Image: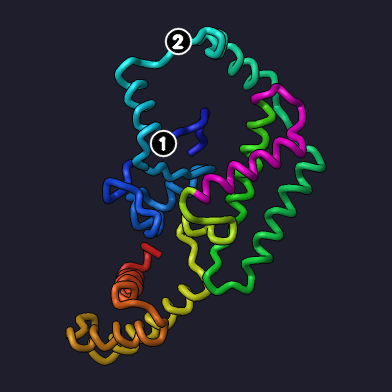
């Protein structure tokens, strides 16, 4: 779907509060096909901080401060956006292209030899490009320059940091698998398929337990993780369209 405007989405985490020690996909019940369409994903923590809590309480109870020196009039702001959209179509400068390209290439190169890496993808590259151009358009510039690109990369890093991720593990948001995870899936797939040939599609409970123990041992993971791998592989075998 082609969006004709920027889309800002907000969602509550699955467990009520965002847990920094669990993966994003465990906590957000949004299909990866939808979540991956967002250029930036931020996790907002509900931290207990007296000063911040007091300021928020004042904001809610008293309403926003109406400082005419800081707020742009609504109609003027609408005209500014309309003018920017109609009259300004920035293109990336050569220096901006070079910076974004090197950021992308070096991030993927660094992650190449890491078995747990889930590096940024061409989709992230497109997101950074869009955001850089948007940043330049906000200033009515004809070119998105080095400063715009640098600022967007820092914003992109900051967004990932709220999720306890970095450009080398950013693929986790989009459901990318690391080398280690792909290897575990292959191990589980072979074990399950071999036993299906012997016992049929309804595996005896004891056989399923033995498979789980093998996955746990060969992949060096906890029992709950072995169960997750087992369930994912079992689902993909019996419902290929879900892959």
Is 10 left or right of 4, judged from the image as shown? left
Is 208 left or right of 151, judged from the image as shown? left
Q: Residue at x 66, y 59 (%)?
A: 107
List x then y, in percent, for residue 236: 35, 70
List x then y, in percent, for residue 130: 63, 38
Query: Which portion, as a residue range, is magenta?
Result: 138-161
Q: Nearer the viewer, residue 188 or 241?
A: 188
Q: Nearer the viewer, residue 136 or 72?
A: 72
Q: Residue at x 63, y 49 (%)?
A: 125
Near mark 2 (Cα within 10 A), the count class, few <14, some 14-19 or many ≥20, is: few
Q: Which mark is residue 66?
A: 2
- The secondary structure type at the circle numbered 1 is loop
Q: Nearer the viewer, residue 44 or 171?
A: 44
Q: Which mark is residue 197?
A: none
Q: Residue at x 39, y 32 (%)?
A: 51
As drawn, the residue found furthest toward the front would be 50
Residue where numbered disc 1 is placed: 9
* Dominant secondary structure (helix, strand or loop) of the stretch shown in magenta: helix
- The secondary structure type at the circle numbered 2 is loop
Alpha carbon separation for disc pair 2 and 1:
26 Å
Looking at the image, is 8 positioned above or below residue 191? above
**Would you say residue 164 sits in the magenta stretch?**
no
Q: Nearer the viewer, residue 19 or 208?
A: 19
**Would you say residue 143 sits in the magenta stretch?**
yes
Q: How is the image coloured?
A: rainbow
Q: Reading the chain from its start, which is encountered first: label 2 or label 1?
A: 1
Q: Can residue 17 be seen from the camera position used here? A: yes
- Circles 2 and 1, Cβ within 8 Å, touching? The answer is no
Image quadrant where residue 86 sits: top right
């Amino acid at each position: 779907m082609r969006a004709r405007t920027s889309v800002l989405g907000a969602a509550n985490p699955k467990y009520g509060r965002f847990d920094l020690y669990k993966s994003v996909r465990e906590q957000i019940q949004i299909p990866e096909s939808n979540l991956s369409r967002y250029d930036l994903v931020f996790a907002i923590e509900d931290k207990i901080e007296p000063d911040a809590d007091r300021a928020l309480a004042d904001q809610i109870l008293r309403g926003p401060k109406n400082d005419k020196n800081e707020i742009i009039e609504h109609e003027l702001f609408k005209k500014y956006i309309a003018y920017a959209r109609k009259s300004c179509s920035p293109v990336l400068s050569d220096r901006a292209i070079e910076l974004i390209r090197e950021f992308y290439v070096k991030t993927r190169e660094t992650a190449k030899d890491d078995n747990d890496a889930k590096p940024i993808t061409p989709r992230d590259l497109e997101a950074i490009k869009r955001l850089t151009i948007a940043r330049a358009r906000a200033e009515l510039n004809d070119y998105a320059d080095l400063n715009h690109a640098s600022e967007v990369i820092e914003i992109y890093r900051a967004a990932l940091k709220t999720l306890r991720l970095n450009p080398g593990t950013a693929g986790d948001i989009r459901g990318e698998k690391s080398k280690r995870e792909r290897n575990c899936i292959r191990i589980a797939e072979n074990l399950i398929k071999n036993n299906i040939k012997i016992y049929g599609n309804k595996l005896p409970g004891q056989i399923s337990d033995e498979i789980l123990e093998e996955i746990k041992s060969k992949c060096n993971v906890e029992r709950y993780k072995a169960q997750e791998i087992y369930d994912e592989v079992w689902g993909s075998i019996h419902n290929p369209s879900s892959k």
